[in-house]
Image (tube, coloured by chain):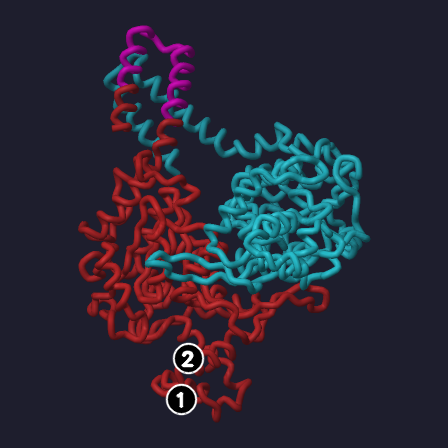
Chain colours: A red, B cyan
Amino acid sequence: MRIRQIDADATRNVKTRRRRHPFCTLASQMRSLSRALTLLSLVATLGVSAGATRKDSLPSWNDGESKAAIVGFVEAVSTKGSNYVPPAERIAVFDNDGTLWAEQPIYVQLAFALDRVRALSSRHPEWRQEQPFRAVLDGDLENLLAGGEEALTRLVMATHAGMTTDEFAATVLQWIETAKHPLTGRRYIDMVYQPMLELLAYLRANGFKTFIVSGGGIEFMRPWAERVYGVPPEQVIGSSIVTSFEMRNGVPVFVRNPAMNFVDDKAGKPVGINQHIGRRPIAAFGNSDGDLEMLQWTTAGTGARFALIVRHTDARREWAYDRQSSIGRLDHALDEARSKGWTVVDMARDWKVIYP
Amino acid sequence: MRIRQIDADATRNVKTRRRRHPFCTLASQMRSLSRALTLLSLVATLGVSAGATRKDSLPSWNDGESKAAIVGFVEAVSTKGSNYVPPAERIAVFDNDGTLWAEQPIYVQLAFALDRVRALSSRHPEWRQEQPFRAVLDGDLENLLAGGEEALTRLVMATHAGMTTDEFAATVLQWIETAKHPLTGRRYIDMVYQPMLELLAYLRANGFKTFIVSGGGIEFMRPWAERVYGVPPEQVIGSSIVTSFEMRNGVPVFVRNPAMNFVDDKAGKPVGINQHIGRRPIAAFGNSDGDLEMLQWTTAGTGARFALIVRHTDARREWAYDRQSSIGRLDHALDEARSKGWTVVDMARDWKVIYP
C-alpha cells in the first residue's frame, strides 16, 4: 500500500514536470534532485518492512503453519498497531544444540572434549589407567557414558581448564575449522540448520537482537558464533567455569579453573537471561526439555510473545528423536507446547533443506 | 550495494525512456535521480565522521589535553587507517559511581538501602534493638560504618533480597524518581555528569557499544540506566545476588535470595567483562582503584586503546578527593595512569559544567 503511494507520487511529478518544462534546464534537475532525495528517504524508511513483505526471507521453509506463525509474529511486532514492540525490546533467544545445529549422536562439545583427551594423552600417561580417560582412549563410549555426569565433568575439567581464555579460544577455533562429524563426514560447523540461519537473519532485519542461550560452554561458542550465526560474543550466554584474573609477567590474563561457575540449562536458562540481558525476551526458540523454563519465562510476559520448538522428525536427512532420547529429550516441553499453542516445527515437513 | 542496484535500474530506465522521449522529460529526471542517489550515498557514508569533526560533540568539555585525547582516539579508530577498529569491536566500558554520577558522601545505593530500612522498619520492630539497623534508624552513620563490610552486607541483604526481581525494580524506580541528595537538594538521578553523558553519546554516534561495569548492583542500575545513560539493560554489568527461578501459581518469577552471586569490583570487573561481553574493550573509563584492573585489561590489548580516569578535583562544584578517601579512593590507579600515560580528567579544569 505504501509502495503504491510512492509510485502514485512519482507519476504525479512526471506529469507536473512535463507541463512546465518543455526543455531541459538546471532548474528541473535541481527540483528532481530534491524530489529524489525525498523519495530515497521514504524508501529508506520503508526499506525493512517493504523488503520483508515482498521477498521471501525464509526460502528454506516450506509454506505452512510454522512459517506463517513466524512471519505473522514478526510483522505484528514490527508494524505500528496493538502488537507493536519497540526495537529495543525485540529480544529473541535461541538454544544452540539441536536448535541451531545438530546434536546427535553426542553434543559437539563432547566430541571436542574427546578429541582433546586424545590430543593431550601423550602428556598424561596416567590416563591409560584412569577412568573416564581410559574409556575415551579405548573409544569405549558406552563405558564413558556409564560414568554419568561425574565422568563427564571430570572430562570437561581436564580438557577445558588449566589454560588462559585466549589459549582455549585458539584451541576451539583450530578444532572447529577442521573437525568432522563421524557419520555425515561434514564439518560440525557445516551442520548448522540453514532454515534457522535464515530465521536469525530475518529477525535481525526486523530490528530484533538475537541471543544464544545454550547449555554448552559460553567460551566454546563465542570464538565462532559471530561468523557462523551472526551473533556477537556479548550476545552469547552459556555455561561457564570459574575464571580468574591474573597478572603474568605484568600482562593480565584470564585463567580457566576446574570448577563450575554457572550451568545454563533448564531453570538456569531464564536465570542466565536475567543475568545477561536483564529484560524478558519476546521470542524464544528451543528443541528440548532443557529449554522449557526459557520458553515459559518468555511467554509469561504481556503483549505479543512467540515460542517455537524444533522437533527432530527427519530420520532420513537428520535424526528423529524426542521423548526417549538421552540427548535433547523432548517430552514435557512437547506437552506444554501443545497445551499452550506454541509453534512446533516438524523438520521433515517444514524444512526444504537441513544444512547450508 | 542496494544503492548501486537502484542506480543500475535507473540507468536502464533512462535508456529505454530516452528513445521514447526525445525532449526533456522523465529522462533528465531519472539522470538527476541517479546522480542524487550517488550523492546521497556519499553523504550517508561520510555522515558520521563529518558530523563528528564539524560540530563539537563535547560542548561541556573545555579545550585541553583530555578532550583532545578523547577526540583523537575516537577519530583514529573510526577512520580507515592503521588504527581503524571495526564497529563490532568498538566496545567502551564505564564505571558508574564517581565516573558517571556522584558518589559522595556515600554511594547512592547505600542511601537507597538506608531509606529502605526506614521504610520497612514498621514491619521489623526487632530492628530497634539490632545492629546495624538500629544505627540506621538512629541516623548514626558513624556507628553503621564502624560495623564494616559485614554490617553493610547485612543491610543490603535485608533490603535487596526476599522479593521478586519485578518487585525490586519497581521499588528502585519509585525511589530514584524522587530521592534527593541531602547536601545538594538535587535528585540523585540529576547528579549524573553532563560531560560524561556527552561522551557516552559521542562514542555511540561513532559506532561504539557502551557498557556500564559497576561495583553497584546490576538490578539497581538497570531499571533507569537506559533512560538516563542511554545504556540498555543488556549492556549493564554489576554486582549481583543469587537469583532463582520459581513458579508461583503457574507464573514464573525470579526471586532475589540473600547471598552474593558476583562482586563486580577490582579484579571482578574484567572477569565480569569477560563473562558478559566476551571480548576485550578498546576504551575504559573509571575514577578509582576499583577500576584499575579493568583499565589494565583494556589497555593490554593490541591496537588502539584508551583509558581515562575522572579525578575529583572540584571541591566547589562537586567534591575533591583521591588517595585518602574511603569512598572512591584513587591511589594506585593514579600512579599507574601517570606511568602509562592514561588520560586523567581534572574535573575543575576540564569540565565546564558538572550536572545537566
The kind of residue tagged 2 is Glu
Q: Secondary structure at mark 2?
A: helix
Q: Residue at x 73, y 52 (%)?
A: B140
Where in the figure is residue A175, as x and y percent of width and height? 45, 70
According to the image, label 2 marks what residue?
A: A149
Per the model, the C-alpha gap separating discs 2 and 1 is 19 Å
> Outermost residue, bottom direction?
A129
The secondary structure making up most of the magenta span is helix
What's the chain of the residue with tag 1? A
Magenta stretch holds residue B77: no
What's the chain of the residue with tag 2? A
| Drawn side of residue B348 relative to residue B58, left or right | right
| Drawn side of residue A215 relative to residue A60, left or right | right
Magenta stretch holds residue A31: yes
Q: Secondary structure at mark 1?
A: loop
Tell me the mark number nearer the camera, choosing from 2 and 1.
Answer: 2
Q: Residue at x 33, y 44 (%)?
A: A303
Where in the figure is residue B61, as x and y percent of width and height? 70, 34
The residue lying toward the viewer, choosing from B222 and A262, is B222
Q: Residues within 10 Å of mark 2 (few under 14, many from 20)?
A: few
Label disc, if present, on residue A138 of the rendered structure: 1
Where in the figure is residue B167, as x and y percent of width and height? 47, 50
The residue lying toward the viewer, choosing from B173 and B45, is B173
Q: In this rendering, is residue A114 above or below B77?
A: below
**Which quarter of the figure is the N terminus of chain B placed in?**
top left
Where in the figure is residue A126, as x and y percent of width and height? 52, 91
The residue lying toward the viewer, choosing from A21 and A65, is A65
Give the magenta-colored segment's residue range.
A11-40
Q: Residue at x 19, y 51 (%)?
A: A65
How many marks on residues? 2
Q: In this rendering, is residue B3 above or below A342?
A: above
Q: Residues within 10 Å of mark 1 (few under 14, many from 20)?
A: few
